[in-house]
Amino acid sequence: MNVKILRLDLIFLAKLKQLLNYKYKILFVFIIYLVGLAALILANFNYIDDRDRILYGTFAFFWWNRHSSTIAASILSLNSDYFVVTFPYSLFISIFLLSISSIIFLKTIDKKLLNSKIALLASVSIGLSPYYLENLSYKFDAPLMALSVFASIFPFLFIRYKKIFVITSIIGLLIMLTSYQASSGIYMMISIFLAFIKILEKDIKEAFRILLCFCISYLIVGILYLMIYNPEATYANTHILPLKYFLIGLDKHITNYIKTIYSDMGGGSRVYLHLVFGFAFIFVAKSILNAKINKFLAFFLSIITLIILFILSFGLYLIIITPTFDPRSFIGFGVFVGILSLYSIYKGKILSSILIIIFVHYLIMFANYYGQSLKAQNDYETFRWTIMLNDLGKFLDTSHMEVESKFNIKTLGHSGVNPVIAKSKIQYPLIARLIPNLQNSWSWSESALDNYGIVGNSKNKDCDEYSSTKVLIDTYFHTIESFNPNKNTTCFLITYKNITDYKSNF
C-alpha cells in the first residue's frame, strides 16, 4: 500500500514538474492577458463591492457559502479581520492563475497543440471573454474568482491517472463551490468534451472511465457541499428548484441565458457571435472527418455535444430558483468558446488560424475598450460627486447626524453614464451591463458616499414616507431636498438627473 501511495505522490510531483517546464508558454499567455487588460489596470476603477471593501476591509463571503474565498482572502491580506486592497498586485495574481489554467486547458483539449502559438492565443478565451471582464474588474474578488477557474481545470492535469484525477477533482470542485460557484460548469464541460472525443476514437471504455470519474467526483462533492450549504434569497435565490417545477425552471433559465447572450452581442459585437458559430461549424465538420465511428452518428453526436456543452456553460445556476444573469455569472461561456476554438485548429489549415487571430484581436480590442470606458465612467462619476457634495456640504452640519455619526440620506434618480459610453451602447450592448453606475437609488450609492467622508444612513424608517420637502438646491445635474419627519430627525433627498438619457442596467 505504501508503494502505491508513493507512486501516486511521484506522479503528482512529476506532473507539477512538467507544468514548470511550460514556464515560457505560461509567460507568453500571461503577456497576452496583460496586453488585453492594460487599460483595465490603468483605469484603477473601484468596482461595486470594492467601494465598501476599501473603506471597511470587509470579507462577507460566508453569506454565499464561499468559505475558500474567505480563507484565500485572509492569506492574501495576511489578515483574517481586514481585507487589504492590493491592486494591481491582486490582478496580476488573477492573470497568473488564468495563465496556468489556460495552459492546462490547452493541454487537456489537445496536448499536440502546446507548441502552437495560435493555440496559445486561443487559450486566452477563458480570461479575456467579454463576460469574464467583470470578474477581473473587482480589485478584491478577482483572484478569488480566478481561483475557482483554476480549481476547476487543475485536476485535468492528471486525467491519465484516474485515482489522482478523482482525488484532485474532489478537492478542486470543493474549492470551486466554496469560492465562486459561477465556475461550476467548467469541469462538467471539459469532462463531457473528453468523453465525446474518446467516443469518436472508438475508445468507449476510456469515455466511460472519464464520465464515471466525473460522476463520482461531483456526487461526493455534492454530498459534502450540501452539508455546509446555506441557501440565500437576496438578488438571487440559491434554493434548488423544487422537483415539481424543475423542468419548467430549467427551460426558463436556458431560454433567458440564450436571450441574454444574443442581446449582449448586438451591433458590432455580432462579429463575436459569428466567430463562435464559425468555430461551432468547424467543430462539427472536424468531428465527422476525424471520427472512427459511423459518420452520421458522429454528426448527430457532435450536434448533441455542442448543445450539452452550451447548456452546461451556465453551470449549477441552471438548477437554482433565481439565478443571476450578471456578466460575471457567465464564466462558463468563455470556456465553452475556448473548447470550440481550440478544437477547430487544423494542422496546416489556414482558415482556423485566421479565425482565431481575428477572434483574439476582438477579445483584446474589446477588453481595452472596456478598460477605457471604466476610466471615462470614473472621471464622470467623480465630476458628478464633486459638484453634488459641494452643494450638499453647504447644508450639512453635526446637528444632522444620527447614531454612529451618520446622516439620513436617500438617493434617487439616475445620473446616467459618460456621454461617450452612452453613445457606444448600440454597437456594444454588453457595455451597458458591464459599466456600473453608483449614482442612483442602489444601496451601493450610499457606500460610495462613505468614501468621500459623508456616511449616509438610508435605513431610517422615519425617512421612508414624506408628503412635502424643502428644495435646498435644484441644478442641471441634481436636486437636493430636506424634510423633518420629527423634531429630532432631518432627512436629505438627493435626486440625480440623467443628462445623457441613458438607461443603465445598474
Image (spheres, grey):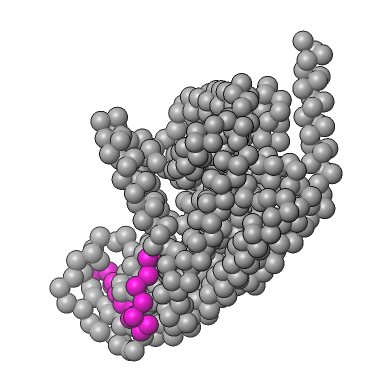
Residue 436 visible within the image: no
Q: Is residue 496 magenta?
A: yes
Q: Is residue 32 visible?
A: yes
Q: Is residue 152 above or below residue 337?
A: above
Task: Name the side, left or right, on which 72 lies relative to 22.
Answer: left
Q: In the rendered view, would you say 117 is above or below 480?
A: above
- Farthest-out residue, top: 1
- Considering every residue shown, the one lying at the far front of the view is 295
Count of labels shown?
0
Position of 394 with respect to 305 (left or right) is left
Q: Nearer the viewer, residue 242 or 315?
A: 315
Q: Is residue 193 left or right of residue 321?
A: right
Against 337, residue 432 (above or below) is below
**On the rendered image, what quadrant is the N terminus found in?**
top right
Instruction: Give the image location of residue 49, x and y in percent.
Output: 49, 59
Q: Which residues are magenta?
A: 487-506
- Quarter of the image containing the C terminus? bottom left
The residue at the point 53 percent across, 25 percent down is 215
Where residue 488 sits, quadrant-wise, is bottom left
Q: Main secondary structure of the magenta part?
A: loop
Left or right: where does residue 440 sit relative to residue 140?
left
Q: Nearer the viewer, residue 379 or 445?
A: 379
Percent across and percent down for residue 125 are: 61, 55
Q: Nearer the viewer, residue 471 or 190?
A: 190
Measured as percent of width and height from the top left, residue 438 is found at 42, 69
Residue at image position (79%, 50%) is: 115
Tell me the quarter of the picture where residue 18 sits. Answer: top right
Q: Residue furthest left?
A: 467
**In terms of depth relative to the viewer, which is nearer, 290 or 83?**
290
